[in-house]
Amino acid sequence: MTIDHSEHSKTERGSFRLDETDKALALHWKSGSLKYSQFELLKEGGVAKLYSCLDANLRRRVVYKTLHDRLIDDEIEVQRFIREARVTANIAHPGTVPVHELGRDRNGVPFFTMKLIHGRDLREVITSLKAGEPNTLRIFTLSSLLKILIQVCHVLAYAHTRGVIHRDLKPANVLTSQFDASYVIDWGLAKVWGDPEHSNPRMTGQDDPAITPVGRRYGTPLYMAPELARGDAQIDARVDVFGVGHLLFETLTHQNLLSGETVEEVSYNLINKPLPRPSDVARTSIPHQLETICIKALEKEPKDRYSDVVTLADDLSGFLRSLPN
């Protein structure tokens, strides 16, 4: 599901090897987590770890995501982890990462496996653009970046038709591959319409841990929509409109939209202070039409935003068409 900078990634991009594809399938073949080997750590966060590994039966490398051992008894984290796998698996779109398997290892720790994608996340791209890295500047022009955001809108639009709101959009959750495909990842905080969000009271309404958890803060405060920061009981797909607007802001300015030393300060600023315009913080000029699109997507009141991500994508596409070839 993510970038593999290891030696395996360099060899995997070449031709198939006959000795691998034609290798006999063992009579006593391995199943579940036992069929995975050659683990290499890709990324480690506070909740989960991602590895690239070899599927012994299909002879291909995949991404293996697993919870930290210390969280195996944390009911909410386990529920969230399983939800991420199942939601992702059920949003069958070219812009979501295929999920191969969900299970538990021999120690009872949940895991799921996904397609291994070679590419970069948008956070890395923006960081490189801000640093003036020549190759990134050459590849990720304004047109190519807008095309990525339009693809993100299409993924979200499909998810919305399936009754799913992502609600945790941020640059790190957008992957762009070497073949110009873009993916929206990390659906662990997704809101599923009609789902009571589990029987645990910490998973419902005002107590949704993505908003106001007991004892600790979940989600990504720097990327929350105002209604999430306020803890509104009712949210809709316009949460993701704000999320795309936030991505557009950072793509244009290479700066953070929100600021604050603490979660509470970030939330207070988001709810009570005016948001900056892209032209206020950008080091280069911002096309007026594009800034207008960004500002509309970032309206604090959902009713003042684009009604859906499709309309937002249409305006981005219209701007693209206006650019000289």
Image (cartoon, rainbow, N blue to C red):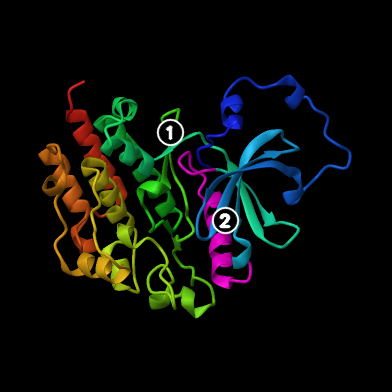
* Direction from residue 99 to residue 191 in the image, left or right: left
SS label for mark 1? loop
Q: Quadrant of residue 75?
A: bottom right
> Residue 14, relative to residue 190: is it above or below?
above
Mark number, residue 181: 1
SS label for mark 2? helix
Query: What are the residue bounds of the magenta stretch?
Result: 72-97
The residue drawn where x is 11% and y is 49% is 280
The residue drawn where x is 32% and y is 73% is 231
Amino acid under disc 1: Ala
Which residue bears the numbered disc 2? 86
The residue drawn where x is 20% and y is 48% is 294
- Expressed as whole percent of the image width and height from the top left, the position of residue 198 reads 53, 72
Q: Earlier in the sequence, mark 2 or mark 1?
A: 2
* Direction from residue 64 to residue 20 in the image, left or right: right
Disc 2 to disc 1, how far (Cα)? Answer: 22 Å
In the depicted view, which residue is nearer to us: 182 or 261?
261
- Expressed as whole percent of the image width and height from the top left, the position of residue 28 reads 88, 42
Q: Badge 2 local density, few (<14 within 10 Å), some, or many (20+)?
A: some
Instruction: Look at the image and tell me in which quarter the C terminus lies.
Output: top left
Q: Quadrant of residue 230?
A: bottom left
